[in-house]
Structures are given as C-alpha cells and as structure tokens.
Image: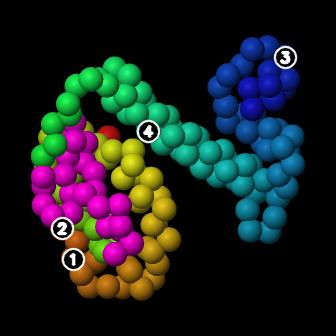
Amino acid sequence: MRYALHMITDRAEDRLLFDHQRTIAEMFGFRDTPERLAVEQFMKRYYRHVTALAGLNDMLLQHFDEVILRGKEALETVKLNERFETKGGYIQVRSRNLFRERPAAMLELFLLMAKHPEIEGVRADTIRLIRDHRHQIDDHYRDDPRHQRLFMAIMRAPATCRASSDA
C-alpha cells in the first residue's frame, strides 16, 4: 500500500487520501461491478484488514504486557459470576467451552462490561473465543427472545458505562 502511494505521488506518502483511493483500487485489480464501485470494494477490504491487524496488535500488546512487563506479578482475579471473571482488570471466560455451550454468553459479556465500568477490556483469549464462535450469531440467534432481551439490556445501560466499555 505504501509503495503504491509512493509510486502515484512520486514522493514519500503514507496517508491513504481520498484522492488516491480510486487509483490504488485499480492498481490492485479491483473493477467496478453493477453492485459496487471498485474503490468501495477496495476500501471495504482495506478496512477489514486494518481492523483485523488492530485486533491482533491489541492481543499481542496485552500478551506482551502480561508475560514480559508484568510476568512475575500475580494478576488479581475477581469472579463476576459462574461464567465470567476479570483478571488484571480484563474480563475473561471461566470455561473455554462457554460460547459453544451457551452462545448467549457472548451478549452477557458485553452486558457485564456495561455494568462494570472498571473493566478495562476483554482478554485476548476471550476475544479469540468470540471470534471462533461468532458464526453462531445467525437469524435464529437474533430471533431468540432471550438474546433480544440481553441486547436491549446492553442498549439500556447508562451511556457512561457503554462509553467506558468501548475500549
């Protein structure tokens, strides 16, 4: 991407400005279709990759912090309920099988974060488990009244709690 930007600007350019997106989309082989412009296809793929890399970076930084920076420290573990606990301020599942056995727990995790603004984020292993089980969120899952109630409880949580759990 950077090399393509350098080529089309004839200088060191590291910003993917709107003016360059169409040209780079063509360089990478994207073509307009009746449904979507090439630049839209390109930017969708670009943002998906950037988002995935950001998530990976967050997990690596968390792992680096725990293993290298605080490797000898005992991280405080606090039980939230039978399914979740916090470790070092980050929420995690208490069983690796939780999302497979109880898919509603994916929503419950976010509700707990909304109710506990002191939670700093989600632990890397739990993020991986969510990613591995997100395929369970389908039309049947969305139509389940229990899941709808959990979702609405998250949406009704005070805005200050939701804002603090976005990180």
Residue 80 location, quadrant? bottom left
For discs 3 and 1, the disc positioned in front in the rendered view: 1
What numbered label is drawn on residue 149? 1
Mark 2 nearby-residue class (10 Å; few <14, some 14–19, many ≥20):
some
Mark 1: which amino acid? Answer: Arg
| Badge 1: residue crowd in 10 Å (few <14, some 14–19, many ≥20) | few
Relative image position of residue 19 (x, y in whole percent)? 72, 34
Q: Which quadrant of the figure contains the C terminus?
A: top left
Q: Is residue 83 magenta?
A: yes
Residue furthest top in the image: 11
Q: Earlier in the sequence, mark 3 or mark 1?
A: 3
- The residue beneath circle 2 is 153
Asked whether disc 3 touches disc 1, contact meaning CB atoms under 8 Å apart, the reply is: no
Q: Residue type at mark 3: give it.
A: Asp
Magenta extent: 79-101
Disc 1 to disc 2, C-alpha distance? 6 Å
The residue located at (34%, 75%) in the rendering is: 101
Q: Nearest the camera: 71 or 63?
A: 71
Quickly name the residue at label 3: 10
Tag 2: amino acid = Ala
The residue depicted at 72 percent of the width and 55 percent of the height is 41
Q: Residue at x 20, y 34 (%)?
A: 75
* Contact between labelled residues 2 and 1, with CB atoms less than 8 Å apart: yes
